[in-house]
Image (spheres, rainbow, N blue to C red):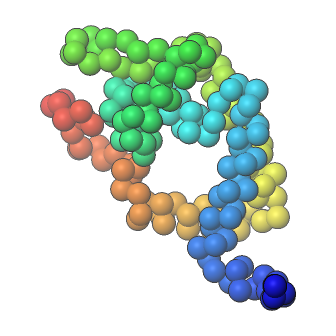
Amino acid sequence: MGRLPPVQPELVTSSTGYLVVRLGEVMRERTESLLTRWQLTARDVRVLGFAAARPLSQRELAEVAGLDRTTMVGVVDKLESLGYARRERDATDRRRFLVTVTESGQRSLGEALALLAAAQDEFLAPLSADERGSFHAALERLFLAHDPSCRPAQEDSPPANGASA
């Protein structure tokens, strides 16, 4: 059997795509390990955060969180079983159910987000404050360019469910 060629890290680290993907993996691993105390994943926190902002249907949550509907059902089932969220009938449309965050869910989300913010600060510690700002701005610009489902809502846009205001 032949020998493996010597490792040349610059062949990999010269790729911006590789660096973005690998840093995302490292951050996800850290995030997931921190969230175990609440039995949550990064995806669960994302959904809980959107639902905490305002009650949304599962379909709307799936859309803003970038998940398919089947996955969203599983996430909401899990959040319900943990006592962090519940499905409630929409008072304006009895056919719809809205996902709302419970008091326990609000508390756990707040604690988790505080811990994640501290972990993010630690992760970004090698960068100066100016570099952090530039890095975030560049990532946000790329994110908005490539993930239109999460662009900020415009003041004059109709509600996500298509109903008139």
Q: Furthest-front residue in view? A: 1
Residue 144: give x, y in percent of width and height. Answer: 43, 60
Which sits in the foreground, 76 or 55? 76
Residue 99: give x, y in percent of width and height. Answer: 41, 21
- The quadrant holding residue 128 is bottom right
Residue 135 appears in the picture as rendered = no
Position of 108 with respect to 69 (left or right) is right
Q: Which residue is drawn at 66% across and 22% down?
A: 108
Please say if 43 is above or below 82. below
Position of 159 with respect to 144 (left or right) is left
Residue 103: give x, y in percent of width and height. Answer: 58, 13
Which sits in the foreground, 136 or 98? 98
Q: How many numbered circles are shown?
A: 0
Q: Residue at x 61, y 40 (%)?
A: 42
Please say if 141 is above or below 50. below
Residue 3 appears in the picture as rendered = yes
Which sits in the foreground, 105 or 35? 35
Which sits in the foreground, 52 or 72? 72
Q: Residue at x 30, y 47 (%)?
A: 154
Position of 156 with respect to 112 (left or right) is left
Q: Which residue is drawn at 71% across and 34% down?
A: 35
Quarter of the figure that contains the N terminus:
bottom right
- The quadrant holding residue 20 is bottom right
Quarter of the figure that contains the C terminus:
top left
Q: Furthest-left residue in view? A: 164
- The quadrant holding residue 123 is bottom right
